[in-house]
Image (tube, rainbow, N blue to C red):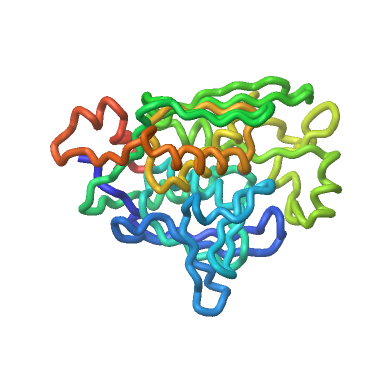
Amino acid sequence: MVWQKTLARAVDFVGIGLHGGQPTRLSVQPAPAHYGLRFVRTDLPGRPQVMAHYSRVVGTLRATTLGEGEATVATVEHLLAALWGLGVDNALILVDSPEIPIMDGSAASFARSLGLAGLRSLPWPRSYLVIRHAVELREDQQWMRVAPGRPSITYQIDFSHPMIRRQRYTFRMDDNSFRREIAPARTFGFLKEVEHLRAQGLAQGGSLDNALVLDEQGVLNPEGLRFPEECVRHKILDALGDLALLGLPLVGRVEVGRGSHALHHRFLEHLMRQESAWQVWTPPMHNREFSSAWGATPAWEGAPA
Ligand SMILES: [Zn+2]
């Protein structure tokens, strides 16, 4: 049986916001079944909550920002990807600033510490969003689609930069490889854009400690790349974080070309409007066959980190 999961204990992080540059404390805490993933702004009067749901997206410029009323939480995607990647359905996320800390630009430290905390099963089955027929969104050079099949995401990017060019990578969501293959891939940017971003109030906390920075020829970071195709792996990390905003694990084959947070968000809205294309499915109590066929029981569950 595939039960809903939460964390076995709270996990705390400190860091700075990539775009705002402010010091931030974050505490990811256990939550009951059907709670979902929710942020609480502990620095604001009344400690307002913001649901991690695509309907709460209020900004997609360089990061995904959620908001409800006056309360916003920016750059949620790497943390949400780590929670999703570890199979956490329910968590309360306390944050004392308007932005989730960037850490090293990847989800590695989130995935490592949350993995060390371990998971706890809750006495309710997990539901899935199962794709029944293909849905596609095309906008100029960008596209995103999903088709029925085992959960996977294939991402393609094209940059004229000599260190990137065309990169394509497929991540199979049931492979238990998130922490190794996707979580360590860092966010990336181009040196020529940095001044422009800073003028817009973005990337104020950015440095070579929390982003891969490329000049005309190569990578400025002295340690170089973590993977030859680190950039496209990071795009998969971003997409996983944005897909977590569905609120249910997606069972389907996702493909994205030259995507962005804005495209991921418009695609989720497009997909959810097409109600005949998907079905919310809860495995019957004794259906072990589905668990193995769809990898719905990830091998990392219960495993020591
Ligand atoms: Zn990112």
The quarter in which the C terminus is drawn is top left
- Residue farthest to the left, as pictured: 286
Would residue 59 be found to the left or right of residue 172 on screen? Answer: right
Query: Which residue is pictured at 83% across the width and 39% down the height?
Result: 191
- State whether residue 163 is above or below residue 35: above
Residue 129 visible (yes or no): yes
The quarter in which the N terminus is drawn is top left
Query: Which residue is pictured at 42% across the width and 55% down the height?
Result: 37
Would residue 193 be found to the left or right of residue 45 on screen? Answer: right
Query: Which residue is pictured at 36% across the width and 60% down the height?
Result: 30
Q: Quadrant of ligand 1?
A: top right
Residue 151 image offset from top left, x and y in percent: 40, 29
Residue 171 image offset from top left, x and y in percent: 48, 27
Query: Which residue is pictured at 42% across the width and 31% down the height?
Result: 173
- State whether residue 247 is above or below residue 147: below
Residue 101 visible (yes or no): no
Would residue 289 be found to the left or right of residue 88 on screen? Answer: left
Residue 57 image offset from top left, x and y in percent: 56, 53
- State whether residue 209 is above or below residue 156: below
Who is closer to the viewer here, 1 or 14? 1
Looking at the rendering, which quadrant does residue 139 occupy? top right
Residue 69 image offset from top left, x and y in percent: 55, 68
Who is closer to the viewer here, 272 or 256? 272
For the image, the number of numbered tags is: 0
- State whether residue 113 is above or below residue 43: above
Who is closer to the viewer here, 143 or 277? 277
Looking at the rendering, which quadrant does residue 130 occupy? top left
